[in-house]
Amino acid sequence: MSANPWRLRPALTLPVLTLLALLACVIFMTINARGNWGFVLPFRGTKLLALVLIAYAIAVSTVLFQTVTNNRILTPSIMGFDALYVLIQTILVFIAGSSVGLLDPGVKFALETLAMVTFATALNLWLFSGRVRSLHLMVLVGIIFGVLFRSIANFLQRLIDPNAFVVLQDSMFASFNTFDRDLMGIAALTIIVSSLLGLKLLHTLDVLALGRETAVNLGVAHRRTVMFILMLVAVLVSVSTALVGPVTFFGLLVANLAYVLIGSHKHVFILPAAILLAIISLVGGQVIVEQVFGLNTSLSIIIEFIGGLVFIFLILKGATR
């Protein structure tokens, strides 16, 4: 354990983070709440549930991805998920025009999630079924596919009617204020099932974090386990992206903050800490945006700005394992 005086023991850090997360949720539900509570509670409660689900999905997927890649400056977005989401939105607007808003939200959500999970499955099978299973190869292929998706999206956007392009612009950036409340049930169910499936690997993650050779020597079926974890990551990222749009640096921010506060490599502490920090950041940030700035700015812009600064700091520090 480090002698850093600011680093609390996990047994103390997690209760403090839990209290802060609960405090943020209570403030979100009650601050400036006037009128009929029969309307206020369901309205704010649904929004709070969405923020918690998104925080959970982004935090868990980032920690799992950094564990299997053995690198703390990577996020799942490096694999081209964000670019693929923008490409899917562009294709839908290119085909349906301004009437894309008339598409059934459930069908659109299922299409986006299925496309991203299928892409991740094909990429993982390709990268981990051959003799060469290199982290550098995976990152390089992800970057190349991301550039390809962005290039195709940019080309199609130049051909789209200007009125339809205005509709497309709203879906190209993450928004924590507007989301389809009818999708909350299926999103929550998907995240719960994925979490239950991955729960049995909680202690295996600690072994994977030691590196491929060590994990294999300790009896872990590395290829099969990594494939399974990457599929869970793909599902979590796809659900969160389909709900609110692409978020690039948020996972990087909360995951690295969790590593610093916990000071342990055990995922039984790291994962809850990252989830609680994500809830505090999203719910607390949304309270500030709504109550202080009057919705005149976007929470996603603030998060990406801070996350980008953290990314640059980690790069300069060389914060890879």
Image (cartoon, rainbow, N blue to C red):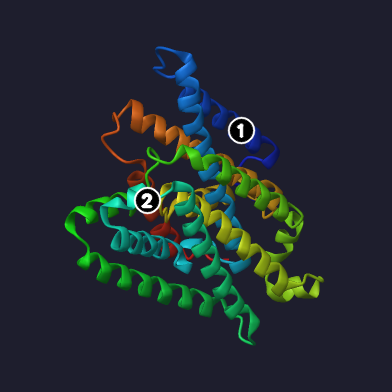
Residue at the image point whose x is 37% and y is 45% from the top:
300
Name the residue at the right extreme.
Answer: 219
Query: Horizontal placement of 205 versus 55: left or right?
Result: right
Residue at the image point whose x is 78% and y is 70% from the top:
220
| Residue 286: x %, y % from top left | 40, 34
Q: Which SS class for mark 1?
A: helix
Query: Horizontal placement of 109 versus 97: left or right?
Result: right
Position above or below: 309 against 70: above
Write down the quadrant of residue 179 in the picture. top left
Asked if the residue under mark 2 is in contact with the one under mark 1, i.e. CB atoms within 8 Å, the reply is no
| Foreground pick, 138 / 108 | 108
Spatial separation of the CA atoms under disc 1 and disc 2: 24 Å
Name the residue at the top extreme.
Answer: 35
Which label sits on residue 49? none
Position above or below: 27 against 63: above
Which amino acid, mark 2? Glu
Label 1 environment density (alpha carbons within 10 Å; few <14, some 14–19, many ≥20): some
